[in-house]
Image (cartoon, rainbow, N blue to C red):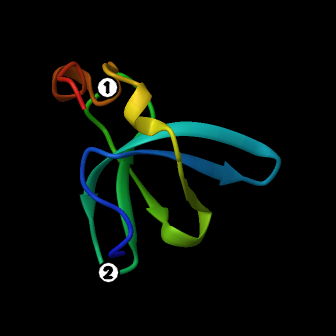
Amino acid sequence: MDEYREGELIIYQNGDRYEVGKIKRLTETGAFVWYSEGDTAAKTPYEAMHKITNGFAIKETTLGGDDGRRRL
């Protein structure tokens, strides 16, 4: 949990599929992550999340609806 922060972009691995998400809120067992432009965030286990090393290069996203339109 300490390695992630709210607002950070991550890669979610679901079997052989990968999705980009933006962390809304951290919990003890996983993070609530936006995977679309809507307001709903999905609980994602930390084991399935991967950091994006060059995430700093992504300046703007629409993940998370209006909240996601802000710069990272």
Q: Mark 2 falls on what kind of element?
A: loop
Q: Position of residue 35 (x, y in %)?
A: 45, 35
Q: What residue is drawn where x is 34% and y is 46%?
A: 8
Q: Quadrant of the C terminus?
A: top left
Give the residue drawn at x 82%, y 47%: 16
For residue 64, which numbered disc appears in the image? none
- Left of 19 or right of it: where is 72? left
Q: Give the class, few, some or many, for how many residues have Cα within 10 Å of label 2's Cα (few <14, many ≥20).
A: few
Can you give x and y, in whole percent of width and height, for residue 2 in the image?
Answer: 32, 75
Q: Tell me the number on the disc at residue 38.
A: 1
Image quadrant where residue 55 sits: top left
Q: Residue at x 28, y 58 (%)?
A: 5
Q: Residue at x 40, y 78 (%)?
A: 29
Q: Is residue 16 left or right of residue 55?
A: right
Q: Are marks 1 and 2 in contact (CB under 8 Å)?
A: no
Amino acid type, label 1: Gly
Disc on res. 28: 2
Question: Badge 1, how many Cα within 10 Å: few under 14, some, many 20+?
Answer: some
Compared with 36, 22 (above or below) is: below
